[in-house]
Amino acid sequence: MSALTTPPSPGRGPSITDVAARAGVSIQTVSRVLNSAPKVAVGTRARVLEAISELGYRRNPAARALATGRGGLIGVLTPSSALYGPASVTAALGLAAVEAGVHLAVEHVVEPDVATVQHGLSRLVDQYAAGVVVVAPVREAYEALAGAQLGVPVVAVSSGGDGAVEVSVDHRAGARLATQHLLDLGHRTVWHVRGPRGWYEADQREEGWREVLEAAGREVPPVLEGAWSADSGHRAGELLARVPEVTAVFAANDSQALGVVRALAERGRSVPGDVSVVGFDDVPESAHFLPPLTTVRQEFSELGRTALQVVLRMIERDREPDQHAEEEPEHSVQLQPQLVVRDSTAPPRT
């Protein structure tokens, strides 16, 4: 199927990306046509308008108001980190902003203490951001957000659950999927390498793991402390390899799982022959681990798109309160993860 006939993805309305593909032009060109910018060739403009008509594309009214009004920015506060989760959410927000025809101002935070986070939020408001999305995976960032008085709509990509409007993944449910999968294969219990303290995701993944074991009446092994790195997984794997009773491990993320698998292999314990291993995130490389990793997938692209949609709706309500007076206030959105079964899990040897 050619780019000119590619239909929009199922389950959502046509986006600016779909219009660009149908017209055979860049997303920036479509944006210029939508904003009546000059210096667009007559033929190109006609193709874009025809594609808009054929697809039934309708621009988000909040995005249109934002693009033409004072404060034509959405602020994004995000950790200054190469960690896969926060970096992927920030990238997804950028793509969603392009599709919506709005602009982002991104403020990176090196140390997520309360004072630094609040300073970053103030800088975004000072840049006339009409709304702010905060990637807030740690407690300090969430506490700073709770205490800030910004005067603009704010959405947290987080799981703090303490009053702010949030877009999050149900990490507890994902951990339950991983743990139940291992029990269903016949393992008597599951060991857990957790993420760093102070991270909501790490806490909730541990809680989900513990809930399944306790509900099944299984032994709850001691938790192994970890970070989000393969190194920390390797250190935990060295300890686990010395315990003959270990047959199943749930690692808090895929990087940890990679380290666990390596440490087990170095000590002569095969995966999944001797020990089954499950990760979390479904990073692109996880399908190419040796063996390919069973993991829990969270859709970072959907996180970014949903967070932007929520903050745009909140901005529209603020700008036109009379038109939305009878609507319910914006609620938090929780996305569900998915178990992806690959070759790193199997029934235990009998």
Image (cartoon, rainbow, N blue to C red):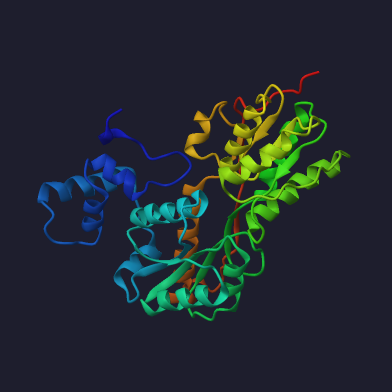
Outermost residue toward the top?
A: 350
Q: Is residue 259 left or right of residue 6?
A: right
| Image point (85%, 43%), residue name | 215
Is 117 above or below relative to 228? below
170, above or below 316, in the image? above
Q: Is residue 288 left or right of residue 244?
A: left
Return the residue nearer the eye: 289 or 33.
289
Residue at point 32%, 59% (across, down): 101
Quadrant in which the N terminus is drawn: top left
Q: Viewed as shown, does residue 127 lie left or right of 348?
A: left
Quadrant (top left/top right/bottom left/bottom right) for the C terminus: top right
Which residue is at the front of the view, 136 or 47? 136
User: Percent position (x, y) of residue 32?
Assistant: 21, 57
Q: Residue at x 55, y 27 (%)?
A: 290
Residue 254 rendering spot, x and y as whole percentages: 57, 40
- Position of residue 9 relative to residue 159, above or below, is above
